[in-house]
Image (tube, grey):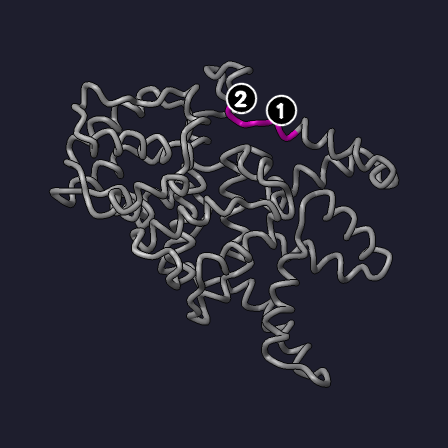
Amino acid sequence: MLISALSPERTSRMNRFNSTVPDDEYLADSNVLFYLSDAVTQLLEHKEEYTQFGVIRYFAEYFSSVKNSNHVLFREYNYIKATPHNRASFIRVFWRCYRQIGKSGDLLSMLEYRSLLQLMCPDFPLELVQSAARIVLMDDAIDCLMSFSDFLYALQLQFYYQEFLDSVLVIYQDLLAGKSPNTVIVPTSTSIEQLPSVAAEENDTEELQHDGVDPSTLAQCIDAFCDRFKRSHPPRSCMREALEQTNKVSYYSFLMSLAKHETINQTIGALPSKAELLIDPEMDQELDKLIAQISVSPGSNSSGSAVGGLKEVQRKASPRRNIHHRRKMEVESDGSTEETDSSEN
């Protein structure tokens, strides 16, 4: 069940039926033990509630939500970023929840996007949102307005490959300072967690944007780093392609090229192509039904319909909330339970 939910990048490297993959390697790559540990923790913390349904049903609900990518809603940031599947799931749910913003053509500021993210994850860090905004705006002024699609693809790149991009920033800054490629300090896997975020480099942001480095030199350093990097990173061919497009490359122009690269988007597997980003017939049908119901009610208005649509989508929560809400809905109406189940697919 879990394998089918993971990104193509990871499923191509492992298969539980492939005898050449050791058991411990499969468990580590699939993060099965992480989800099992979290499921047990949630069960123990809410034992009185879950024992009314039975442990078997609880675990079925939990892993079903993981497979359907609904498990990240309203969870803490440390949980959301814990696995590649969690990160991709969060990006996908963010897209589905707020796709109407893109359809309406509204432009929002960085702080407004942060508020939307915090509705789904209350402790979602400001620094990560700032980093995504800098990719879109090329660091000119992060308080400018951005389209939903531009911000979404930038957020996907920054969030999914955060540790890798932080390491690339260190490499870029060394090259920008005039260091030889042979003396560039390539971060090790043990030092990645201590790397400063892009948003923390406030004193260097102007320098990062207006200067640049030789693309071939940067490509050489990044390629050497990928040989030692143990986490997810964009395909090397995509990074080489992005660096071959110019004679001088800045950090943010490089990231913007990666954010727009369709192969990278397909590798992550969370979002459709940009041409299909605002097309979701299933969601459109749900919103049309909701708007029709509200429009016939006294005192209804269009803004209320939009808010209601978002709330309807956001009701799909983590396994703990799913089970709790389903129990309430089953008491009230069998039909409402079926509607919730179908909307999660």
Asked whether, in this view, residue 196 is left or right of residue 284, the answer is left
- Per the rendered image, the range of residues in magenta is 26-35
x and y, in percent, of residue 58 in the image? 76, 38
Residue indicated by mark 2: 28
Residue displayed at 16% across by 45% down: 245
Q: Is residue 27 magenta?
A: yes
Q: Residue at x 44, y 61 (%)?
A: 109
Type of amino acid at the residue the image marks with label 1: Leu
Q: Is residue 343 left or right of residue 255?
A: right
Residue drawn at point x = 40 percent, y = 55 percent: 151
What is the secondary structure assignment of the residue under circle 2? helix
Q: Main secondary structure of the magenta part?
A: helix
- In percent of width and height, residue 3 lies at 54, 33
> Can you give x and y, in whole percent of width and height, for residue 64 in the image?
66, 41
Q: Nearer the viewer, residue 123 or 153?
A: 123
Q: Is residue 47 above or below residue 300?
A: above
**Front in this rendered view, residue 223 or 166:** 166
The residue wearing badge 1 is 33
Q: For the residues marked 2 and 1, what is the alpha-carbon distance in whole angstroms? A: 8 Å
